[in-house]
Amino acid sequence: MKTAGLQVSHREVAPDTVVVTLAGKMMLSDSAALETVIATLLETGRRKFIVDLSGLTHIDSTGIGTFIASLGKVSQAGGALAMAGAGGMVREGFRVTRLDKVFRFFPDVESARATL
């Protein structure tokens, strides 16, 4: 799925485990794309998600709010959500909002996958 500033793709890496890759800018108008992909995958029985943030260059408060909503949906379904590869201002956005204490961050997808 591609919006004006955000590209969202996903791939299954193990039964029940999906890597959702984000690239570009996750701003107000693009934020719903992640929530849509997560909801669709939950409907198909997926429960473990790794969000690869290594290609994400910018995120605003709406984007961060989308992660909170997605984590809630995944948790309600009995699943798990991990963040991988966040750097720069994206990682800082989660740190200043203290959400780095809520989400599990890993340096890369493989590290996250080993934990899930």
Image (tube, rainbow, N blue to C red):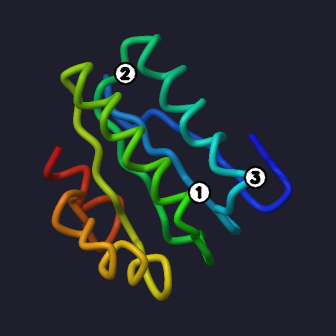
Give me the residue at 27% from left, 65% from top. Answer: 99
Give me the residue at 25% from left, 56% from top. Answer: 112
Give me the residue at 21% from left, 59% from top. Answer: 104
Please, what is the three-letter code of the amino acid marked with disc 3? Answer: Ser
> What residue is shown with label 3?
29
Q: Is residue 35 above or below residue 109?
A: above
Q: How far separated are the C-alphas under marks 3 and 1?
A: 15 Å
Q: Nearer the viewer, residue 1 or 90?
A: 90
The tag on residue 79 is none
Name which of mark 3 and mark 1 comes first in the sequence: 1
Residue 68 location (% of width, % of height):
37, 48
Q: How far separated are the C-alphas under marks 3 and 2?
A: 26 Å
Name which of mark 3 and mark 2 comes first in the sequence: 3
Residue 91 location (% of width, % of height):
39, 78
Does dot 3 land on a helix, a strand or a loop? helix
Q: Mark 1 packing: few (<14 Cα in 10 Å), some, or many (20+)?
A: many
Q: Is residue 85 above or below residue 73?
A: below
Residue 58 location (% of width, % of height):
61, 75
Q: Nearer the viewer, residue 52 or 30?
A: 30
| Callouts 2 and 1 close, C-beta under 8 Å | no
> What residue is shown with label 2?
46
Please, what is the three-letter code of the amino acid marked with disc 2? Answer: Arg
Q: Is residue 98 above or below residue 20?
A: below
Please, what is the three-letter code of the amino acid marked with disc 1? Answer: Leu
| Callouts 3 and 1 close, C-beta under 8 Å | no
Does dot 1 land on a helix, a strand or a loop? strand
> What residue is shown with label 1?
22
